[in-house]
Image: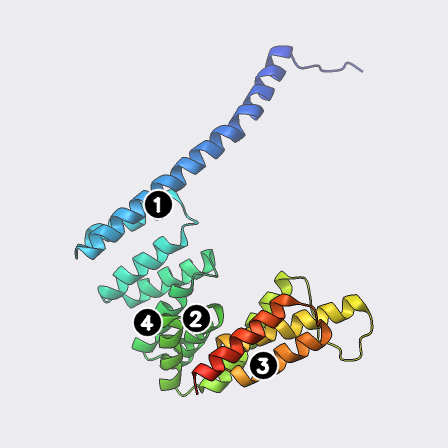
Amino acid sequence: MKKIIPHLPVVTLILFFLTCVNPCFAQFSAESKKMAVAYRDKGLEAQRSGDLDTALVYYQKAMELDPTLAVAYNDAGVIYEAKGWNDRAKQAYGKAIQTDSTLASAYYNLGSVYEKDGDLEKAAYYYKQRVLIGDWNDEWTTKARQSLKALGVSDPEIQQDFMDQQLARAERSEGITGEPRGNDLDPKGRKRSARLHYLRGKQLASMGKFNEAIMELGLAITFDPKNKEIKKTLEDVNRKMLATH
């Protein structure tokens, strides 16, 4: 059987193409992303001056150059909403969230549009998502909580959900899961339990629940008595609590 061997020049050309195409594409992609940010900045400038049509053109150009630029979809949604094009606004905000699930502003904006359209169930859902991914004391988190309250969702319910989600995120990032165990005699297990109580204490303190925070931090010290970080946090929380009385 006769073997077919490609000519050397052909093989050389293929190898040359493979070694060049990836760096060239990466450079083009990086340049496109840079240009997209520049167009987005021009859009913001036009929007601030009241020229919504020009702003929208710039945002659309930014999205074309970098389809992963979530803020540009959110910006376009703001323009659509200002023009009364609520369906387009929903699509744009939804695309922003799909592109970057951590973009907090898009959740509030989407909730606001649904509330305007009378879909209170979806409005409450997106307001709640805005609360859950933000900082409890952030201005827009507070606005989302106020919007939820107006829709009949109680703050204590949101507080518990918020704390559960924030703690779960913190525990995942530190590679610890489960519940602290009071009877754990293993040194590593006690360190882990101390960390869990510490994280919960910090979260409670950030929400203004100082008594509960002090209780959690006290338990953390019980598991890890020499931990300076826990001691300092407990002292700070005690000072904050005294300042509120």
Q: Residues within 10 Å of mark 4 (few under 14, many from 20)?
A: many
In this view, 241 is above or below 140: below
- Inter-mark Cα distance, 3 to 4: 40 Å
Left or right of 168 in this view: 142: left
Labelled disc at residue 214: 3
Q: Looking at the image, tell me whether mark 1 or mark 2 is earlier in sequence order.
A: 1
Report which residue position mark 2 lands on. 130
Q: Looking at the image, tell me whether mark 1 or mark 3 is earlier in sequence order.
A: 1
x then y, percent, for residue 63:
36, 48
Report which residue position mark 1 lands on. 37
Labelled disc at residue 87: none
Q: Residues within 10 Å of mark 3 (few under 14, many from 20)?
A: many
Residue 245 in which image quadrant: bottom left
Farthest residue to the left: give it.
Answer: 50
- Inter-mark Cα distance, 2 to 4: 14 Å
Mark 2, secondary structure of its residue: helix
What amino acid is labelled 1 in the image? Val
Q: Looking at the image, tell me whether mark 2 or mark 3 is earlier in sequence order.
A: 2
- Inter-mark Cα distance, 1 to 3: 45 Å
Residues at circles 2 and 4 in contact by the CB criterion of under 8 Å: no
Mark 3, secondary structure of its residue: helix
- Inter-mark Cα distance, 1 to 2: 24 Å
What amino acid is labelled 4 in the image? Val
What amino acid is labelled 2 in the image? Arg
What amino acid is labelled 3 in the image? Ile
- Inter-mark Cα distance, 2 to 3: 28 Å
Q: Looking at the image, tell me whether mark 2 or mark 4 is earlier in sequence order.
A: 4
